[in-house]
Image (cartoon, rainbow, N blue to C red):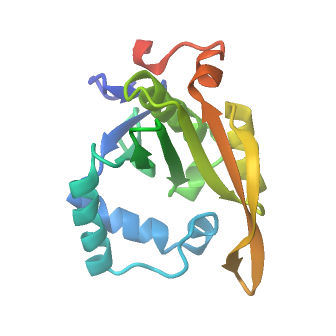
Amino acid sequence: MGDERRPILRGERVYLRPAEREDIPTFIEWLGDAVVSEGLATRAPWSRVAEENWFDELQKAQSKSMWHFVICLRDGGRPIGFCALHDIDHVNGSTELGIGIGEADEWDKGYGTEAMEVLLDFAFGELRLHRVFLHVFEFNARAVHAYERIGFQHEGAKRQAYYRHGRHHDMLVMGILAHEWDARERRPTWELE
């Protein structure tokens, strides 16, 4: 790999690092792109002030009620997206996963899947969580397929819970349990070089 460091949270081709204030312009660019934001709950572009306020709140919550990371390519360190565990419930061992690849030219290369593997290893293998779930728009077939492939199960749907482009859409709920993740025949990401 182009980077001689061995990041703590790493896959073969990507690694996860905390967000820095210098990432704010990149986040604004990603969330302001109509193609990228289509699969996210973003309805309008964010201003720098709004993004800075979000970042300040993120820093307060980091490692307490959430973990937010920037997805970077190991070869060169280029940031290509973000992923997070939100609203961590330490009593019940549950959290919501969110992910987005902000660089559309990096879609369909498996980077998002690899980042989710790293994040799930972190959730189950480091934080001792029991369940990770996510919400996905029913119209986002590409994402649904990726989540199914990694092992998420359909748990239900929030019928017509999301309004976008003049109509209501179902919001699917998918989840994976620690024992389901552990049963997969794969090498944990912390063992990768």
Closer to the camera in the image, 126 or 75: 126
Asked if residue 136 is positioned above or below residue 146 in the image, the reply reads: below
- Quarter occupied by residue 110: top right
Q: Is residue 13 visible?
A: no
Taking the image as shown, residue 83 lies to the left or right of residue 60, namely right
**Given the current orientation, which residue lies at the most extreme front position?**
91
Q: Residue furthest bottom?
A: 166
- Please give the name of the residue rendered at 48% of the width and 75% of the height, measured from the top-left corner: 32
Q: Is residue 59 visible?
A: yes
Residue found at x 60% / y 49%: 134
Could you say which quadrant of the image residue 185 lies in? top right
- Residue 163: image x %, image y %? 69, 79
Residue 148, by quadrant, is top right
Total number of numbered discs in the rendering: 0
Residue 81 picture location, percent across and down = 46, 51
User: Residue 7 appears at what percent x and percent y?
Assistant: 31, 27
Check the picture and name the quadrant holding the C terminus: top left
> Is residue 102 shown above or below 48?
above
The percent coordinates of residue 41 (x first, y second) are 56, 69
Left or right: residue 131 compared with residue 185:
left
Q: Is residue 2 above or below residue 18?
A: above
In the depicted structure, whether residue 169 falls above or below residue 75: below
In the image, taking residue 156 as reference, residue 99 lies left or right, namely: left
The N terminus lies in quadrant: top left
**Which is more toward the observer, 101 or 161?**
161
| Left or right of residue 188: residue 10 | left
Residue name at image x 43 percent, y 12 percent:
191
**103 or 90: nearer the viewer:** 90
